[in-house]
Amino acid sequence: MVSALPVLLAVTDLSIAANADGRMDPILQGIDLSLNTGEVLGIIGESGAGKSTLGLALMGYLARNCVVTAGSVAFEGTDLFKLAESRRRDLRGVRIAYVAQSAAASFNPCRRLIDQHIEAAVQHGLLEPQKARDEAAAIYGELGLPAELALRFPHQVSGGQLQRAMIAMAMSCRPDVIIFDEPTTALDVTTQIGVLSALRQVIRNHRLSGVYISHDLALVAQMSDRIVVLRHGRVVETADTATMLQAPKDDYTKSLWAVRALAKPQRTDTGLAPELLSIEALDAHYGAFQVLHNINFSLTKGQAMAIVGESGSGKSSLARALIGILSPTNGRVRFEGTVLPSSYKGRSADQLRRIQFIYQMADTALNPRHSVKTTIERPLKLFFKLPSAMREERIRSLMAAVELDERLLHRKTKSLSGGQKQRVAIARALAAEPSLLICDEVTSALDQIVAEEVLKLLLRLQSEMLLSILFITHDLSAAKAVSDRIMVMQKGKIVEVGEAQQVLTSPTETYTRELIASIPQLRVGWLDEKISAARAKRQAI
């Protein structure tokens, strides 16, 4: 029994607060939990629940404006926050390691992966450089990475490979505990399943203890022995994984997978609507490398089409070609009956206005120094030249449309939550009164509850404003929630397109079936079944 194993980490009545302009705002309140030797503990909750703050606290680390106001975090019986900072630094990366959400942001882009991998083990005097390189090659092999990949720079490997390289680096000192903070959130489903499978095997082979933090209950269920649910900085519920999935007690816990149940009712009038967008024989290149191959499809007015596929399939490149950032090398884009110039520089103000783009990361798409009002007001000034009073009225109408409180109008966008920022980005796009919205992974960085709210918002806006939407995503659950039709892309080509229900329930292409089969299921043992099936397939070859 897991409970019979010795306790490695113990959190007792932990409260942490942040200094916000002289006011202490609570982040964590009265947290009690434990991690046993050889156990993986899952921590799940929505944005702002305190998951990452708790994950960092398990290493004895706090953000500069945070303080422990009560309680303790004990590692092997020693309170980390009573140790000198130098002692805590000796533990971090050696006894307790951390894997961050964004591998791309975590690596130094100017240094090769191998040099970053061996740094901690060499600096702490645990291994000689050559021995550290030999062990790096071994752990790369366990994670399904070729040893020579370690000689590359971070930008020279894919997102899934870089995430595995970060896991390998966390293991370089053979730690007792690894904290995984949303390690696969930004990955497509097929890449994600590969990373999770490799991670699960490494945890078992090395008998690691781990803390797996995520907003996706299905992922946590595949990795964890027990699950802790956080909300507003408090523990809502704790149970072993099977119990949590089969009989959650708290209503909030039950809501965590509600987005998976969303499904857009299928339209019956699609053949009556006029054509809005037509893509004809479109090719595109980055230099000598061809990224789009003979793309042909159309979209009618008021229709929503999801474009799905793994990383590198060409989804975002297609979006860039549609908005004129990437000029096609062949073919054409016809919009409302008119062939658009290949570059946005040649398009009229009205053509630019009528196609609006919503980016994946609202953090980088919004100017953090601008207020919400300034952000939404800009398209009104640019495209419509409205007088001040009419702009004010329109801004308030847009705030209501995206369900944002008017009291946020004068707040800087940097002070908003992830969901609020994405709503501001949607309001800014709607301010231009577009005919077509292109949404590029707009829910991939959001937790399940906030993602569900944004998807419901898009559905309502589409219905009320008769918008056409191209919804680019690697999340088939999100595609099901918003789309009338689904187009599947692989290696820059369209491999399947059809009504959403047909593609999701009766796909004709092997690749589409693989995508659907890679969606994590809300049941214990699903990942183990995938690992066993993959092993049997390899042995049969």
Image: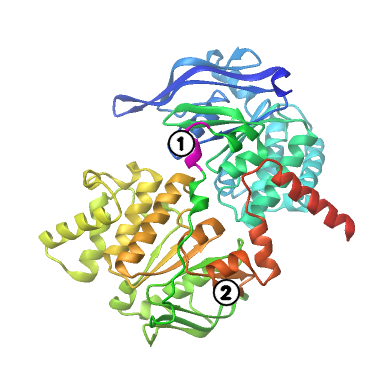
User: Can you say whether 540 is above or below 413 in the image?
Assistant: below
Left or right for 344, reference 134: left
Asked if residue 254 is among those painted magenta in the image, a careful observer would answer yes
- Disc 1 marks which amino acid? Tyr
Q: Please tell me how crowded label 1 is: few (under 14), some (14-19), or many (20+) other residues with Cα within 10 Å.
A: some
Measured as percent of width and height from the top left, residue 215 is found at 52, 41
Q: Which residues are magenta?
A: 249-256
Q: In which quadrant of the rendered image does the C terminus lie? A: bottom right
* Residue 114 makes an appearance in the image: no
Measured as percent of width and height from the top left, residue 138 is found at 81, 42
- Disc 2 marks which amino acid? Val
Q: Secondary structure at mark 1?
A: helix
Left or right for 91, reference 535: left
Q: Residue at x 67, y 18 (%)?
A: 7
The residue tagged 1 is 252
For residue 497, the mark is 2
Which image quadrant for residue 228? top right
Q: Residue at x 44, y 50 (%)?
A: 452
Measured as percent of width and height from the top left, residue 197 is found at 72, 46
Q: Residue at x 77, y 48 (%)?
A: 531
Q: Are marks 2 and 1 in contact (CB under 8 Å)?
A: no
* Residue 517 makes an appearance in the image: yes
Measured as percent of width and height from the top left, residue 288 is found at 62, 76
Q: Please tell me how crowded label 2 is: few (under 14), some (14-19), or many (20+) other residues with Cα within 10 Å.
A: many
Left or right for 355, reference 239: left
